[in-house]
Image (cartoon, rainbow, N blue to C red):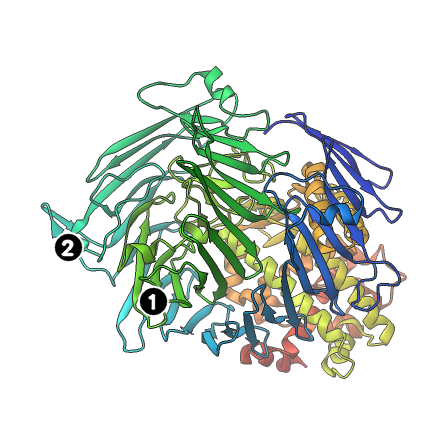
């Protein structure tokens, strides 16, 4: 991935940075150490302006109110009392080329397109939940929540039209997972999970008349790898002496890498970045069985794919000796070390997608341009990508040459809205985008150039599989628009629909990501080439998912997903991270309840667990919860060491290693400083990105040890909430230096009596459980011992949360002891 060097100032702020490509980056700061300008080489690519002490009208004091970035200018014009942006305007540059921002506001405005830009507004509840969003075209989305803070329904009102329901009747299980919902087209989606291990067993979708549209059934191996997926809503057909079932199977090696997959595909030539032939209408008799096998080297690089089916073929890749950079074998030509080295730049970015399709990268290692057609005597066709300061793509400009005319197709990405224009067709299309439960909803409104075969303001509901891949697209009357299936690594195995032109407006496909005309999938931080089964540049987060920074989801694409192009989570790792998130929610809920003066349960819990309930102790507890939250939020699976050992010292459910935590604490202190000094979420995001690079080793310390077996036993015996409590217990050691004086009887029905006895002084200070620690704390009162006891702290958090829970089982546990 190339080397990187940075120069820090006295306060730890990054002043200058350099990389292997020779890019020099310089950041300027004001007296408060807030970023004010960013130069890359000689160009000023960002300028930042903050609200002064007189900017009180819209809560702008100290906030970042104008950010000139590589995509244009972002104006945060109004803020709520919590600091959330409630009105924001995006203005784009005249040119798709990189800007060089002058100092004067007049000079900067001259680089922007004329007009007022696109303004987005938000409304929030007292708990800072987004309840309403108005996009840049005046369309309004409404969100409703239950008393437990879970999404209840989602509605949409197009500009000047009546309100319509996107999703309603959302039901959740005890784990907070959606088990049933009704979309705006009356399609009912349900999910069923295994009661023993919590794994997804079924995903179903039915029309209001009971007709089944999707019936996905999942099978797993003992460690959680998906080994079978069946869609019982699809017919079995017989053709060419074959029985063709709607069943896919998967086999793995001992590293859980996929080595064989079977399924159904289109019976025509289908490989590389191109789509298979479109079927209209869907015809199951035009499908065939296929088998794919995969072979990897020791570093996890694909060496060979063998495809056996209607059109058999294979693909071979060659990997460099001293890196994981790989190139395919084309026309039997085996690339040598020199050719592989020449195919990547110094930072490891691929320079050509295929022969004649050059790739260009900007100074931030973001894909800037693809040239799908290169001409010697005329301008090239190109597709150019433009990003904001945080690295999110805001614009895609495709240029094609037709005789003496240049056609431009422009896509602009705004909050909840895409604006698509095409000079070749005269089309201007506004796509309203919303996630409505399990459905990805897109409403297509043509301002001009609507195809005659399509209706305006069409609402399209996309149903997904367990990976988030769009498999079935329905209209507002629950009629099929298109259906699609995928090979394990993301290529389309077949797709069909009622009209080709209608289906062509589907852009979100595999893993819920947008597929560009190049065949690449955009994941937010990287681009993925499904026919190569690799990312086209290294992981921007470094070696967080192993030393191979091009490998896709550890070569286990059926069981794992990647949200942004970083590290995937799967199986037990996902279970641990879910418990961490549950711990965060419990801490946040308790902290919010501490702010409610009229709450009668908080002082009761404090008195019983800590022996005190004063206003001062309440404020102290709130501050300490904040400290524990900081550790919980910054901890990730890279910090977790999963043990399968039966040694006595390794069989605790979870254990925080304070010696290893010291390195991580240095990283945490740096994040706290950046958080304190950053004036806006945008600036914070940018500063944190750089900080993670500078503190990579400390950030990756494995300080939290978790035993897989005892974790599973504890979860089975006590439930999900206790596992979250265990993590709060361990995080309090790190954040507050709490001790293990006394433990509750968690595995005996989550009985906190020993903890309550500690606060009340009903224990012997020299008892076996307390004595080994108490000799160092002889001057402490029982109240001080109780407050410094990790299990007391964690249990008190959980019981305050339970006191306000709408779940009968949770509230009953609170009432049992309080």
Upstream in sequence: badge 1 or badge 2: 1
Closer to us: 616 or 514: 514
**Quarter assignment of residue 346:** top right
Q: Mark 2 — residue?
A: 237
Position of residue 53 in the picture relative to residue 719 (left or right): right
Give the x, y percent position of residue 317. Answer: 38, 26
Q: Position of residue 733 (x, y in %)?
A: 73, 55
| Quarter in which the C terminus is drawn | bottom right
The residue wearing badge 1 is: 204
Figure check: 214 above or below 319: below
Of residues 13 and 321, the one nearer the viewer is 13
What number is the disc on residue 754?
Answer: none
Residue 781 visible somewhere in the drawing: yes
In three-dimensional space, the C-alpha distance between marks 1 and 2, rounded to whole angstroms, equals 22 Å
Compared to residue 17, the image places residue 224 above or below, namely below
Residue 342 at what x, y percent from top left?
51, 20
């Amino acid at each position: 991935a190339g080397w990187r060097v940075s120069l820090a100032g006295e306060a730890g702020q990054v002043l200058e940075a350099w990389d292997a490509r020779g890019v020099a980056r310089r950041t300027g700061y004001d007296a408060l150490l807030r970023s004010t300008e960013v130069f890359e080489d000689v160009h000023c690519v960002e300028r930042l302006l903050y609200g002064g002490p007189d900017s009180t009208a819209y809560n702008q004091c100290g906030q970042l109110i104008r950010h000139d970035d590589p995509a244009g200018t972002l104006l945060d014009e109004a803020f709520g009392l919590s600091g959330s942006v409630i009105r924001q305007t995006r203005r784009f540059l005249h040119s798709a080329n990189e800007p060089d921002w002058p100092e004067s506001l007049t000079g900067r405005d001259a680089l922007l397109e004329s007009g007022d830009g696109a303004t987005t507004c938000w409304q929030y509840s007292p708990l800072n939940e987004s309840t309403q969003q108005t996009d840049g075209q005046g369309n309004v989305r409404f969100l409703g929540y239950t008393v437990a803070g879970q999404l209840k329904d989602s509605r949409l009102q197009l500009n000047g039209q009546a309100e319509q329901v996107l999703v309603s009747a959302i039901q959740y299980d005890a784990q907070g997972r959606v088990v049933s919902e009704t979309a705006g087209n009356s399609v009912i989606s349900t999910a069923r999970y295994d009661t023993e291990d919590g794994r997804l067993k079924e995903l179903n979708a039915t029309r209001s008349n009971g007709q089944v549209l999707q019936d996905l059934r999942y099978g797993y191996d003992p460690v959680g790898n998906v080994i079978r997926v069946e869609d019982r809503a699809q017919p079995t057909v017989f053709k060419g002496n074959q029985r063709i079932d709607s069943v896919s199977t998967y086999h793995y090696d001992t590293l859980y890498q996929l080595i064989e997959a079977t399924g159904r595909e289109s019976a025509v030539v289908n490989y590389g970045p191109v789509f298979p032939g479109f079927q209209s209408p869907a015809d199951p008799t035009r499908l065939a069985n296929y088998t794919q096998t995969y072979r990897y080297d020791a570093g996890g690089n694909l060496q060979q794919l063998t495809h056996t089916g209607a059109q058999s073929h294979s693909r071979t890749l060659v990997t460099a000796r001293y890196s994981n950079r790989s190139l395919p074998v084309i026309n039997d030509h085996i690339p040598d070390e020199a050719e592989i080295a020449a195919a990547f730049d110094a930072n490891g970015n691929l320079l050509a997608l295929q022969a004649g399709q050059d790739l260009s990268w900007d100074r931030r290692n973001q894909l800037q341009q693809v040239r799908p057609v290169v001409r010697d005597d005329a301008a090239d066709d190109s597709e150019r990508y433009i990003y904001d300061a945080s690295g999110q793509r805001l614009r895609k400009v495709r240029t094609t040459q037709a005789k003496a005319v240049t056609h431009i197709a422009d896509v602009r990405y705004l909050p909840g809205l895409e604006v698509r224009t095409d000079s070749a067709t005269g089309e201007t299309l506004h796509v309203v985008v919303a996630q409505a439960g399990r459905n990805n909803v897109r409403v297509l409104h043509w301002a001009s150039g609507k195809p005659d075969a399509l209706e305006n303001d069409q609402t399209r509901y996309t149903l997904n599989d367990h990976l988030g891949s769009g498999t079935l697209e329905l209209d507002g009357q629950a009629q099929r628009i298109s259906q699609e299936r995928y090979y394990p690594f993301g290529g389309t195995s077949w797709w069909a629909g009622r009209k080709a032109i209608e289906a062509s407006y589907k852009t979100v496909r595999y893993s819920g990501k947008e597929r560009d005309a190049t065949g690449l999938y955009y994941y937010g931080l990287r681009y993925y080439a499904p026919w190569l089964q690799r990312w086209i540049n290294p992981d921007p987060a470094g070696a967080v998912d192993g030393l191979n920074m091009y490998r896709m989801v550890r070569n286990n694409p059926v069981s794992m997903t990647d949200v942004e192009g970083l590290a995937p989570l799967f199986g037990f790792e996902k279970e641990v991270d879910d418990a961490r998130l549950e711990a965060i929610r419990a801490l946040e809920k308790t902290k919010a309840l501490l702010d409610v003066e009229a709450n009668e349960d908080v002082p009761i819990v404090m008195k019983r667990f800590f022996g005190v309930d004063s206003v001062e102790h309440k404020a102290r507890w709130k501050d300490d919860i904040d400290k524990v939250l900081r550790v919980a939020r910054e901890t990730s699976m890279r910090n977790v060491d999963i043990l399968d050992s039966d040694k006595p010292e390794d069989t605790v459910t979870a254990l925080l290693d304070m010696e290893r935590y010291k390195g991580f604490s240095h990283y945490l202190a740096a994040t706290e400083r950046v958080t304190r000094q950053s004036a806006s979420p945008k600036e914070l995001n940018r500063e944190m990105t750089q900080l993670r690079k500078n503190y990579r080793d400390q950030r990756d310390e494995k300080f939290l040890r978790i035993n897989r077996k005892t974790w599973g036993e504890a979860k089975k015996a006590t439930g999900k909430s206790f596992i979250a409590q265990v993590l709060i217990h361990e995080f309090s050691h790190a954040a507050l230096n709490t001790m293990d004086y006394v433990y509750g009887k968690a595995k005996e029905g989550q009985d906190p009596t020993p903890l309550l006895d500690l606060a009340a002084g009903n224990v012997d200070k020299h008892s076996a459980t307390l004595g080994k620690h108490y000799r160092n704390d002889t001057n402490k009162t029982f109240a001080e011992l109780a407050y410094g006891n990790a299990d007391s702290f964690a249990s008190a958090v959980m019981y305050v949360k339970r006191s306000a829970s709408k779940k009968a089982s949770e509230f009953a546990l609170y009432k049992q002891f309080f």
